[in-house]
Amino acid sequence: MFPLNFPEYTFPIKKMDEREFIFDSIRRKWIILTPEEWVRQHVIAYLVQTEKLPASLIAVERLLKYNQLAKRFDVLLYNTLGKPSMLIECKAPSVKLSGETLFQIATYNMVFKVPYLYITNGLQHHLYANVESEKYMPLAAFPKDFLHH
C-alpha cells in the first residue's frame, strides 16, 4: 500500500486468490486490504502502539441502528468505565475530509453520544469535542483524558 501520515507500523499481510488481506488484531481475522482498511489499521496501530490504549477498549466495524437504518461504525473507543468515549470515522486517502464526513459521524454519534469525534483519511486527521448537543469544536491534539470521560 502507500505511506500515510502516521508513524510507520508493520502489519501481517497475505495474498490469496489475487487479493491482499491484512490481519485485524481487534477483530482477530483477515480482512480484505482496501485503502479504507489500510487507514483503519493504521488508526488501530496508533491507538494501541503509540497511545498505549488497551485493545480491549476498542471496537471495530460493528453494527449500529439509526432511524431504522443499519449502519457500521469504523472504530469506537470505550473509557475505563466501559462507556463509549470516542467515535472514529476512517476514509480512503483519496476521499477528501469535509463537512459531509463530520455530518456522517455526528449522525452516528446521535446513537452513542460520545464526547470526542475523530475523522481521518490517513493523510489528514481532525479531532472534535462534543461541546453541547450536536455542536462540535475542533481540537488541536489527541485528548489525553478521554479514557476517563
Image (tube, helix red, strand yellow):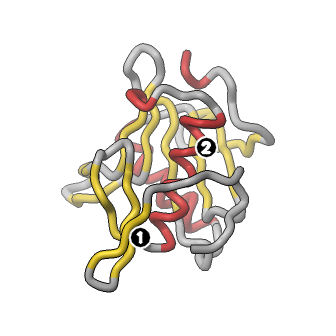
Q: Residue at x 61, y 43 (%)?
A: 46
Gap in angstroms between the C-alphas marked 2 and 1: 18 Å
Q: Residue at x 51, y 64 (%)?
A: 38
Task: Say which residue appears at 71% left-offset and 50% top-offset.
Answer: 7
Residue 142: give its label: none
Query: Mark 2 packing: few (<14 Cα in 10 Å), some, or many (20+)?
Result: some
Percent position (x, y) of residue 36? 48, 68
Residue 100's spot in the image, x, y percent? 56, 68
Q: Is residue 24 visible?
A: yes
The residue nearer to you, when weighing 130 against 57, is: 57
The crowd level at tag 1 (other Cα within 10 Å; few <14, some 14-19, many 20+) is some
Q: Quadrant of the N terminus?
A: bottom right
Question: Where is 4 relative to 24, above or below?
Answer: below
- Marks counted in the figure total 2
Dot 2: element:
helix
Q: Secondary structure at mark 1?
A: loop
List the single residue furthest toward the left. Answer: 68
Give the residue type that dot 1 points to. Leu
Left or right of 9: which side holds 78? left
Q: Would you name the residue on which mark 2 appears?
A: 46
Q: Quadrant of residue 4?
A: bottom right
Q: Is residue 149 visible?
A: no
Q: Nearer the viewer, residue 149 or 93?
A: 93
Q: Position of residue 14 (x, y in %)?
A: 38, 67
Residue 10 lies, in percent from the top left, at 57, 53
